[in-house]
Amino acid sequence: MDLKTQKRLASEILKCSPQRVKFDNDSVKEIKEAITRADIRGLIIDGAIVKQQVVGTSNAHANLVRSQKRKGRQRSHGSRKGRAGARLEAKSAWISRIRRQRLFIKTLLSHNLIEKPVFKTLYRKSKGGFFRNKRHIQLYLDEHSLIIKKEDK
Protein backbone atom coordinates (compact mmCIF):
# COMPACT_ATOMS: atom_id res chain seq x y z
CA MET A 1 0.00 0.00 0.00
CA ASP A 2 2.05 2.91 -1.35
CA LEU A 3 0.68 6.36 -0.50
CA LYS A 4 3.83 8.29 -1.42
CA THR A 5 2.14 10.39 -4.12
CA GLN A 6 -0.82 11.25 -1.90
CA LYS A 7 1.56 12.23 0.91
CA ARG A 8 3.56 14.45 -1.47
CA LEU A 9 0.44 16.15 -2.81
CA ALA A 10 -0.93 16.67 0.71
CA SER A 11 2.40 18.15 1.86
CA GLU A 12 2.37 20.59 -1.06
CA ILE A 13 -1.22 21.63 -0.32
CA LEU A 14 -0.61 21.91 3.44
CA LYS A 15 2.75 23.66 2.82
CA CYS A 16 4.72 21.40 5.13
CA SER A 17 7.11 18.46 5.09
CA PRO A 18 5.79 15.02 4.05
CA GLN A 19 6.87 13.71 7.47
CA ARG A 20 4.30 16.01 9.10
CA VAL A 21 1.41 14.72 6.95
CA LYS A 22 -0.58 12.07 8.84
CA PHE A 23 -3.29 9.85 7.40
CA ASP A 24 -6.30 8.61 9.33
CA ASN A 25 -6.19 4.80 9.58
CA ASP A 26 -9.97 4.47 9.09
CA SER A 27 -9.94 6.30 5.75
CA VAL A 28 -6.84 4.77 4.12
CA LYS A 29 -8.98 3.26 1.34
CA GLU A 30 -10.37 6.70 0.36
CA ILE A 31 -6.88 8.23 0.49
CA LYS A 32 -5.57 5.48 -1.80
CA GLU A 33 -8.29 6.28 -4.37
CA ALA A 34 -7.52 10.04 -4.24
CA ILE A 35 -5.31 10.90 -7.22
CA THR A 36 -5.96 14.59 -7.83
CA ARG A 37 -5.21 17.66 -5.74
CA ALA A 38 -8.94 18.32 -5.48
CA ASP A 39 -9.46 14.84 -3.99
CA ILE A 40 -6.67 15.46 -1.45
CA ARG A 41 -8.17 18.89 -0.54
CA GLY A 42 -11.52 17.20 0.08
CA LEU A 43 -9.89 14.63 2.38
CA ILE A 44 -8.09 17.43 4.26
CA ILE A 45 -11.44 19.18 4.81
CA ASP A 46 -13.00 15.88 5.97
CA GLY A 47 -10.12 15.38 8.44
CA ALA A 48 -8.76 12.19 6.87
CA ILE A 49 -5.45 13.94 6.18
CA VAL A 50 -4.01 16.01 9.02
CA LYS A 51 -0.96 18.26 9.34
CA GLN A 52 0.92 17.30 12.50
CA GLN A 53 2.10 20.10 14.78
CA VAL A 54 5.83 20.86 14.94
CA VAL A 55 7.52 19.51 18.05
CA GLY A 56 9.08 22.52 19.74
CA THR A 57 11.42 22.94 22.67
CA SER A 58 9.69 22.98 26.02
CA ASN A 59 10.14 26.15 28.08
CA ALA A 60 9.44 24.40 31.40
CA HIS A 61 13.09 24.10 32.46
CA ALA A 62 13.84 27.71 31.49
CA ASN A 63 10.81 28.88 33.50
CA LEU A 64 11.99 26.90 36.52
CA VAL A 65 15.50 28.37 36.33
CA ARG A 66 14.07 31.88 35.89
CA SER A 67 11.87 31.52 38.98
CA GLN A 68 14.85 30.20 40.97
CA LYS A 69 16.99 33.15 39.87
CA ARG A 70 14.25 35.58 40.91
CA LYS A 71 14.47 34.05 44.38
CA GLY A 72 18.25 34.60 44.37
CA ARG A 73 19.24 30.98 43.79
CA GLN A 74 21.74 29.56 41.27
CA ARG A 75 24.37 32.23 41.87
CA SER A 76 27.24 30.01 42.99
CA HIS A 77 30.40 29.21 41.03
CA GLY A 78 28.92 26.44 38.86
CA SER A 79 26.18 28.74 37.53
CA ARG A 80 28.43 31.65 36.62
CA LYS A 81 29.24 32.42 33.02
CA GLY A 82 31.58 35.34 32.52
CA ARG A 83 34.22 37.18 34.51
CA ALA A 84 33.53 38.87 37.81
CA GLY A 85 33.80 42.19 35.96
CA ALA A 86 31.06 41.09 33.59
CA ARG A 87 28.74 40.15 36.44
CA LEU A 88 29.43 43.30 38.48
CA GLU A 89 30.62 46.22 36.38
CA ALA A 90 33.75 47.91 37.72
CA LYS A 91 32.17 51.35 37.52
CA SER A 92 29.06 50.41 39.50
CA ALA A 93 31.27 48.69 42.12
CA TRP A 94 33.37 51.86 42.36
CA ILE A 95 30.26 54.06 42.69
CA SER A 96 28.85 52.00 45.56
CA ARG A 97 32.26 51.88 47.30
CA ILE A 98 32.94 55.63 47.02
CA ARG A 99 29.40 56.49 48.16
CA ARG A 100 29.84 54.37 51.30
CA GLN A 101 33.24 55.92 52.03
CA ARG A 102 32.02 59.49 51.51
CA LEU A 103 28.97 58.91 53.70
CA PHE A 104 31.22 57.47 56.43
CA ILE A 105 33.59 60.46 56.26
CA LYS A 106 30.65 62.91 56.36
CA THR A 107 29.17 61.18 59.44
CA LEU A 108 32.56 61.42 61.16
CA LEU A 109 32.60 65.16 60.44
CA SER A 110 28.99 65.70 61.52
CA HIS A 111 29.65 63.90 64.84
CA ASN A 112 32.75 66.10 65.34
CA LEU A 113 35.10 63.10 65.37
CA ILE A 114 37.38 64.68 62.75
CA GLU A 115 38.26 68.27 61.84
CA LYS A 116 37.55 69.98 58.52
CA PRO A 117 41.14 69.77 57.13
CA VAL A 118 41.26 66.04 58.00
CA PHE A 119 37.87 65.60 56.32
CA LYS A 120 39.20 67.24 53.16
CA THR A 121 42.31 65.05 53.03
CA LEU A 122 40.23 61.89 53.64
CA TYR A 123 37.78 62.97 50.94
CA ARG A 124 40.57 63.50 48.41
CA LYS A 125 42.29 60.24 49.33
CA SER A 126 39.05 58.30 48.95
CA LYS A 127 38.47 59.97 45.58
CA GLY A 128 41.94 58.88 44.49
CA GLY A 129 41.16 55.27 45.44
CA PHE A 130 43.53 55.18 48.40
CA PHE A 131 41.05 53.48 50.75
CA ARG A 132 39.82 49.97 50.03
CA ASN A 133 36.75 50.24 52.28
CA LYS A 134 35.35 51.87 55.42
CA ARG A 135 37.50 49.68 57.66
CA HIS A 136 40.61 50.92 55.88
CA ILE A 137 39.59 54.53 56.62
CA GLN A 138 39.13 53.61 60.29
CA LEU A 139 42.57 51.98 60.40
CA TYR A 140 44.14 55.03 58.74
CA LEU A 141 42.55 57.35 61.31
CA ASP A 142 43.73 55.16 64.20
CA GLU A 143 47.31 54.86 62.87
CA HIS A 144 47.65 58.59 62.31
CA SER A 145 45.63 59.46 65.47
CA LEU A 146 43.30 61.80 63.61
CA ILE A 147 40.12 60.96 65.56
CA ILE A 148 39.19 63.55 68.19
CA LYS A 149 38.62 61.81 71.54
CA LYS A 150 35.85 62.89 73.93
CA GLU A 151 38.34 64.03 76.63
CA ASP A 152 40.31 66.09 74.05
CA LYS A 153 37.34 68.43 73.57
Image (spheres, rainbow, N blue to C red):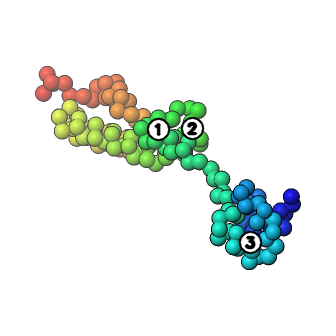
Q: Position of residue 82 (x, y in %)?
A: 59, 42
Q: Is residue 79 visible?
A: yes
Comparing labels 3 and 1, the label whose residue is closer to the camera: 3
Residue beneath disc 2 = 80
Comparing labels 2 and 3, the label whose residue is closer to the camera: 3
SS at badge 3: helix
Q: Going from the N terminus, do you reach mark 2 or mark 1 first?
A: 1
Q: Position of residue 135 (x, y in %)?
A: 36, 29
Observer-nearest residue: 32 or 134? 32
SS at badge 2: loop
Q: Residue at x 59, y 48 (%)?
A: 58
Where does the C terminus fall, quadrant-wise?
A: top left
**Three-letter amino acid code at the position of disc 2:** Arg
Q: Position of residue 52 (x, y in %)?
A: 67, 58
**Three-letter amino acid code at the position of disc 1:** Gln
Please state if 144 lies on the left or on the right of 20 as rendered: left
Comparing labels 2 and 1, the label whose residue is closer to the camera: 1
Q: Residue at x 70, y 64 (%)?
A: 49
Instruction: Measure the C-alpha gap from mark 2 to mark 1.
Output: 14 Å
**Category of crowding for the residue at label 1, using alpha-carbon neighbours closer than 10 angstroms: few (below 14), some (14–19), many (at least 20):** few
Observer-nearest residue: 8 or 129? 8
Please state if 102 lies on the left or on the right of 75 as rendered: left
On residue 55, the disc is none
Residue beneath disc 3 = 40
Q: Is residue 102 above or below residue 48?
A: above
User: Dividing the picture into quarters, in which one does residue 86 lie?
Assistant: top right
Q: Residue at x 19, y 24 (%)?
A: 149
Observer-nearest residue: 13 or 100? 13
Residue beneath disc 1 = 68
Q: Is residue 40 above or below residue 4?
A: below
Q: Going from the N terminus, do you reach mark 2 or mark 3 first?
A: 3
